[in-house]
Image (cartoon, helix red, strand yellow):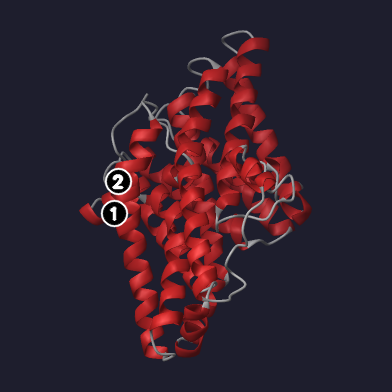
């Protein structure tokens, strides 16, 4: 397992997680309405196009999974323990935040009436979230962004299953080529097919193109690999974009290309280095999880206790952002790290996460 921190990965996670926080700040609650009145262009972009930054999470997640579990194209370790460890790493903090979200939503419902506030949950909702099946079972989400945690787990399981099959069915010297070929085929099937059909957006195959770009960025950027391998991946991705222009695909390709160039040139541990990005990168999964409950409570408190003034609401948005960072730091230190156990592979937005 690799344990050293990568400055560029931290920087990408830091930027992406902050954009997702502001995407939700601009999308949910009365404070968002005031923000749109004050800064219509900025808040409109944050509420809309900023969601595309999730592609960075997907690419970085694929990059780090390849780096940790199959750096040379061979699956390291046993498949089932890897899946179990991933589930524990994701679901421990996730369930803690779901509990926090239920409490914060109850407080918010008491103080304000807003469509963004989740209703009191059913037992089926809670069970579906614990199993990461909420979207597949048509259960309403109990917090913003929880769909990504389920998709991350699906992607991880799909990759491990493919890697295990290659190791089990192919001769040892063919397994790496088989895994790279399988990832490439599934990635192309996603980019040329599944990702163009929104009805697939609760399944891993819809997102596998970006995930595969992250894995291919790791494998093709190895010093012994020819430059043409990375160029071929980029060319096929551009062909998929030309057939059906999608900003999300362009963002995924740009992120993968940046990771590729950074590793190829030896700058992966150095680009984007800084104390702030390192800190924000470390707590990115925690911030991703905990910011929505914070957003709910700050919105409700402002509605109940403060005057209905755009300036006050703008200050409330900034307060919600700052409190989300503080809560994310505390959650990372006191909940995420103790629950994660010894496994070093980062989940979803934490990897990405």
Residue 89: give x, y in percent of width and height. 46, 34
Residue 238: give x, y in percent of width and height. 63, 53
Q: Nearer the viewer, mark 1 or mark 2?
A: 1
Measure the alpha-carbon separation of dots 1 and 2. 8 Å
State left or right for residue 68 relative to residue 151: left
What residue did someone put label 2 on? 7
Which residue is drawn at the image coordinates 66% and 40% (left, top)?
A: 187
- Under circle 2, the secondary element is helix
Which residue is drawn at the image coordinates 25% and 50% (left, top)?
A: 273
Q: In front here: 345 or 179?
A: 345
Residue 43: give x, y in percent of width and height. 49, 79
Q: Is residue 55 above or below residue 158?
A: below
State left or right for residue 165 relative to residue 7: right
Which residue is drawn at the image coordinates 53% and 15% (left, top)?
A: 78
Q: Quadrant of the C terminus?
A: top left
Residue 208 showing in the rendered view: no
């Amino acid at each position: 397992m690799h344990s050293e921190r990568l400055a560029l990965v931290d920087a990408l996670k830091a930027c992406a997680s902050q954009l997702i926080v502001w995407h939700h700040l601009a999308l949910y609650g009365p404070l968002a309405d005031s923000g749109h009145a004050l800064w219509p262009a900025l808040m409109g972009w944050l509420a809309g196009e900023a969601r595309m930054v999730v592609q960075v999470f997907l690419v970085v997640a694929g990059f780090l999974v390849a780096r940790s579990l199959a750096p040379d194209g061979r699956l390291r370790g046993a498949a089932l323990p890897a899946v179990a460890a991933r589930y524990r790493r994701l679901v421990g903090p996730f369930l803690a935040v779901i509990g926090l979200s239920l409490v914060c939503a109850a407080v918010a419902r008491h103080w304000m009436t807003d469509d963004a506030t989740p209703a009191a949950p059913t037992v089926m909702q809670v069970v579906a979230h614990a199993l990461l099946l909420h979207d597949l079972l048509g259960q309403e989400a109990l917090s913003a962004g929880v769909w990504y945690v389920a998709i991350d787990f699906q992607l991880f399981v799909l990759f491990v299953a493919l890697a295990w099959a290659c190791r089990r069915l192919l001769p040892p010297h063919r397994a790496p080529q088989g895994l790279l070929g399988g990832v490439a085929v599934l990635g192309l099937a996603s980019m040329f097919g599944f990702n163009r059909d929104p009805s697939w957006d609760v399944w891993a195959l819809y997102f596998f193109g970006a995930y595969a770009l992250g894995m291919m960025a790791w494998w093709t950027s190895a010093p012994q690999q020819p430059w043409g391998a990375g160029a071929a991946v980029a060319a096929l991705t551009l062909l998929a974009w030309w057939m059906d222009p999608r900003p999300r695909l362009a963002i995924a390709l740009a992120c993968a290309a940046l990771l590729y160039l950074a590793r190829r040139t030896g700058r992966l541990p150095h680009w984007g280095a800084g104390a702030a990005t390192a800190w924000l990168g470390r707590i990115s999964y925690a911030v991703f999880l905990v910011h929505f409950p914070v957003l709910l409570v700050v919105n409700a408190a402002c509605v109940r206790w403060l005057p209905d003034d755009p300036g006050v609401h703008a200050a409330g948005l900034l307060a919600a952002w700052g409190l989300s960072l503080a809560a994310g730091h505390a959650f990372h230190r006191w909940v995420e790290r103790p629950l994660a156990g010894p496994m070093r592979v980062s989940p979803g937005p934490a990897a990405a996460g």
